[in-house]
Image: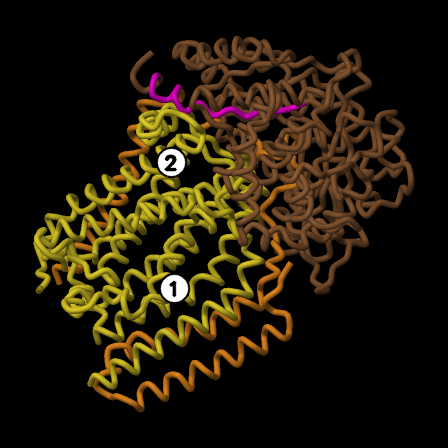
Chain colours: A orange, B yellow, C brown
């Protein structure tokens, strides 16, 4: 319980610290109000807003990543019981990881790892 | 050595300690930069103070139609994540948060940085930060999995996700000795989530300032300070999970933690001087086809040793 | 000046803009910046000081004015023509930065609406003698406020749409083939007046829900801050390999960009971080400016190219070492031992070789080969046109494109074709 209290307190310290930094900055900077400005485009006016439907060409990679990321859900509890369960725990987990790695090789062959 | 939970009242002190060590890291970086530029080293020592003064004197900027709340959350996210990471790391015999899932907590905090850096890039409504924020995500897709498996390795060896148990399990042999691959991958992961050195493609890495291209004043300071804090938190975790934590002769346990953290941190900071930036698109193939299998083999070796040992 | 100001002055960040022909002045500025313990800025947000090397033409000057308006402040601006005048100009700028009262006054006097600048495609600025850059008073924002919005927008067709712009200094860029990849991009919204609909500025609320067809209606689009929303490529006939109708952005690179060839303006159309179309031109110095010198073909020029490429490759230490060798080469001979040591260090880096391998491939070799030749001092010129530069970067992501441009070491003081060093 104390652990969770400490974490909550640390979060409060972090947020408080950030707010304090902003307050100090108000006193030390040459102007309180932020400077309104156009985005930096080498000195030119933007032709359009930058926020847009961005083409993330590494999108297939995110799916591959998700497969492994979900696997991590099992990985952490597994890590605590390897010693107790023994050989079967190791075999089962690494067969699973082997299957996932085969998926990586397939994705690589399909070109999902090269995205520019 | 048993690690004991101390009162939550020590939390502010832990935060102050992290920031102090992070400042020392920034000073070291300044000294190394001064040496490379042929300048007196003492001048480099003042770099963190001078840069802080410069940014606190500088006015903040807001770009037209910026997504300010998201930009602020992203900017403050680095420092916040670093502070939350270091909360679970034992300082010698004491810890402020003896979390039974400390390793998972560290992992969760480093994943928050995906959001933080991407939001910091998205917020300003400007092409250079926007592209850089997406580049960080692309880089994260490469470093995160190896980092996760590297984090699992000491947990398997200790049979626990509690950092105190990890330290106790290293009373004989430090984990770095029999899981060197996991240690190296972990250190690379720390560099990567701090967007530092070879993995700084999202924060400039030489071009246009990346995610920071539109930030000035305290906004910029928070990200800059947050990076050093992240490196420090990562080094503290690495010293605990791989380098034996408080174990060592003669010196008190807390001092050993500090010494090991400082040494690892110095190496991480100095690596920036030795290596050029790796572009995220070049990182993908080696990360998935070389580093990931390597760290899985490392995990397998450690698992087998654990099972054989009983 | 208080403690904060004194401390801050130790880390003054300098944004340097180089007009074609003033490379020696830029080198002198960089050398002074290093010897003062200052540093070079990555962007205007990062900068305290804007230093213009040379006498820019009207379009370059307009870009400088907008960048000047984007420095957060405290800020100072200097223009230097002669390398001998650099130290004095920087001293003067440092004094301006240190003047707390003047800086606070400057901050207070800046307009609430950001200065709008001009579009990169606006070639009409040269015609009506635009404001010369004003290098003394930090509180002078006049050039920003009267940027020629009214006569530029709508009246003249954007140069992007026109494969053969009438302006004389453009002709050489389009000499061989008007149908450059970027030449026929229809910027369908370029006829908006930049100053309408200002009331919605700052709300950051931009819905993309119904923009799928890329055929924008024009005036009924929301325009937060007077800027249109991004649209799809639509009928621009851009390559869209994945068949997705995603937004494209128009991103001008240069002239005010660190580690970038002097005066080069690369109009790019980017989809995500990938350049799908590009067109290059060079912004000339002022008409009455004395003919500038070039560093190209000299040892100093080679080390300058090495420093630029290494800086973009994200290796600050070796970039700084190369810049020191360049400065030594400008005054007397390059120290043999140091240059050998740096060349060895760079050659030994497998990470750098791997990073540059296959980047910017020309018949003679790639970026890694060109770097090796610079280091060995065996480089010789090969002509490359601006059109070829644009073709080389098309299809690359932005970071790689910048490496490619740096690896070409373009000499923008020369008329076409621009020589590129290679084996």
For mark 2, give the secondary structure: helix
* Above or below: residue B66 compared with residue C143: below
Q: Are marks 2 and 1 on the same chain?
A: yes
Residue B77, percent from left and from top: 36, 48
The quarter of the displayed image where residue B306 is located:
bottom left
Residue C413, percent from left and from top: 76, 25
* Above or below: residue B260 compared with residue C302: below
Look at mark 1 in the image and give the residue it sits on: B147
Look at mark 2 in the image and give the residue it sits on: B32
Which residues lie in the magenta part? C6-18
Could you tell me if residue C361 is visible in this image?
Answer: yes
Residue B303, percent from left and from top: 30, 80
- Residue drawn at x 61%, y 14% is C83
- Residue drawn at x 61%, y 54% is A53
Chain of the residue under the numbered disc 2 shown in the image: B
* Above or below: residue C397 compared with residue C146: below
Reply yes or no: does residue C323 show up in magenta: no
Residue C301, percent from left and from top: 67, 29
Q: Is residue B165 left or right of residue C393?
A: left
The quadrant of the rendering that contains the N terminus of chain C is top left
Q: CA distance from mark 2 to mark 1?
A: 28 Å
Depth check, front residue: C80 or C331: C331
Chain of the residue under the numbered disc 1 shown in the image: B
* Above or below: residue C152 compared with residue C98: below
For mark 1, give the secondary structure: helix
Q: Residues within 10 Å of mark 1 (few under 14, many from 20)?
A: many
- Residue drawn at x 18%, y 67% is B170
Q: Which mark is residue C135?
A: none
Q: Earlier along the polypeptide chain: callout 2 or callout 1? A: 2
Q: Residues within 10 Å of mark 2 (few under 14, many from 20)?
A: many
Depth check, front residue: C207 or C315: C315
């Amino acid at each position: 319980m104390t652990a969770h209290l400490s974490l909550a307190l640390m979060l409060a310290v972090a947020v408080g610290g950030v707010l304090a930094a902003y307050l100090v900055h108000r006193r030390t900077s040459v102007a309180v109000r932020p400077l309104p400005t156009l985005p930096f485009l080498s000195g030119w006016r933007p032709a359009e807003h930058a926020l847009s439907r961005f083409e993330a060409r590494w999108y297939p990679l995110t799916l591959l990543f998700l497969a492994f990321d979900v696997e991590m859900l099992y990985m952490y509890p597994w890590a605590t019981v390897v010693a107790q369960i023994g050989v079967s725990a190791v075999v089962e987990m690494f067969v699973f990881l082997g299957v996932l790695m085969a998926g990586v090789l397939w994705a690589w062959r399909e070109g999902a790892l090269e995205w520019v | 050595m048993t690690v004991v939970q101390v009162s939550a009242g020590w939390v502010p002190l832990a935060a102050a300690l992290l920031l102090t060590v992070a400042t020392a890291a920034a000073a070291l970086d300044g000294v190394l930069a001064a040496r490379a530029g042929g300048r007196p080293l003492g001048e480099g020592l003042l770099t963190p103070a001078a840069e802080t003064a410069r940014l606190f004197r500088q006015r903040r900027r807001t770009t037209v139609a910026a997504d300010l709340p998201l930009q602020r959350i992203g900017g403050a996210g680095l420092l916040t994540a670093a502070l939350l990471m270091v909360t679970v790391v034992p300082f010698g015999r004491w810890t402020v948060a003896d979390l039974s899932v400390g390793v998972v907590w560290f992992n969760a905090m480093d994943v928050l940085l995906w959001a933080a850096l991407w939001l910091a890039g998205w917020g300003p409504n400007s092409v250079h930060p926007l592209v850089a924020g997406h580049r960080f995500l692309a880089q994260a897709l490469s470093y995160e999995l190896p980092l996760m498996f590297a984090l699992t390795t000491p947990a398997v060896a200790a049979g626990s996700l509690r950092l105190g148990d990890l330290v106790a399990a290293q009373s004989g042999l430090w984990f770095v000795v029999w899981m060197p691959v996991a240690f190296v991958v972990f250190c690379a992961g720390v560099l990567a989530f701090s967007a530092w050195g070879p993995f700084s493609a999202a924060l400039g890495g030489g071009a246009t300032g990346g995610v920071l291209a539109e930030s000035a004043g305290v906004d910029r300071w928070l990200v800059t300070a947050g990076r050093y804090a992240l490196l420090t938190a990562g080094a503290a975790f690495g010293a605990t999970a791989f380098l034996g934590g408080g174990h060592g002769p003669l010196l008190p346990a807390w001092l050993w933690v500090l010494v090991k953290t400082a040494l690892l941190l110095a190496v991480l900071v100095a690596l920036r001087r030795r290596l050029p930036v790796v572009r995220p698109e070049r990182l993908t193939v080696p990360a998935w086809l070389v580093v990931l299998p390597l760290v899985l083999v490392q995990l397998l070796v450690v698992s087998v040793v654990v099972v054989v040992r009983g | 000046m208080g403690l904060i100001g004194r401390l801050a002055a130790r880390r003054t960040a300098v944004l340097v803009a180089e007009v074609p022909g003033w490379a020696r002045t830029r080198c002198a500025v960089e050398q002074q910046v290093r010897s003062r313990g200052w540093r070079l800025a990555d962007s205007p947000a990062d900068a305290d000081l804007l230093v213009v090397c040379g006498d820019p033409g009207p379009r370059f000057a307009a870009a400088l004015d907008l960048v000047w308006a984007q420095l957060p402040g405290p800020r100072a601006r200097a223009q230097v023509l002669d390398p001998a005048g650099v130290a004095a100009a920087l001293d003067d700028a440092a004094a301006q930065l240190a003047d707390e009262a003047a800086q606070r006054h400057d901050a207070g006097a800046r307009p609430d609406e950001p200065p709008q600048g001009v579009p990169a495609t606006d070639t009409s600025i040269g015609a009506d003698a635009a404001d010369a850059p004003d290098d003394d008073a930090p509180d002078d924002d006049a050039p920003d406020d009267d940027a020629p919005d009214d006569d530029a927008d709508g009246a003249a067709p954007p140069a992007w749409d026109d494969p053969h712009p009438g302006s004389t200094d453009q002709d050489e860029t389009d000499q061989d083939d008007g149908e450059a990849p970027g030449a026929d991009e229809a910027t369908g919204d370029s006829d908006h007046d930049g100053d309408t609909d200002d009331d919605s500025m700052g709300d950051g609320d931009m819905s993309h829900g119904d923009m799928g067809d890329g055929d924008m209606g024009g005036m009924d689009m929301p325009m937060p801050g007077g800027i249109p929303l991004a649209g799809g490529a639509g009928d621009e006939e851009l390559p869209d390999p994945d068949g997705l109708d995603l937004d494209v952005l128009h991103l001008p690179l240069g002239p005010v960009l660190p580690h970038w060839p002097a005066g080069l303006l690369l109009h790019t159309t980017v989809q995500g971080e990938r350049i799908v179309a590009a067109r290059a031109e060079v912004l000339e110095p002022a008409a009455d400016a004395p003919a500038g010198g070039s560093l190209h073909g000299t040892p100093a020029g080679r080390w300058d190219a090495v420093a630029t490429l290494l800086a973009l490759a994200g290796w600050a230490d070796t970039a700084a070492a190369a810049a020191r060798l360049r400065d030594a080469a400008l005054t007397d001979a390059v120290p043999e031992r140091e240059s050998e040591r740096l060349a060895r260090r760079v050659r030994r880096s497998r990470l750098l070789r791997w990073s540059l391998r296959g980047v910017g491939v020309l018949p003679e070799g790639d970026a890694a080969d060109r770097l090796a030749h610079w280091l060995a001092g065996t480089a010789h010129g090969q002509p490359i046109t601006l059109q070829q530069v644009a073709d080389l970067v098309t299809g690359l992501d932005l970071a790689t494109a910048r490496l490619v441009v740096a690896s070409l070491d373009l000499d923008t003081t020369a008329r076409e074709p621009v020589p590129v060093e290679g084996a």
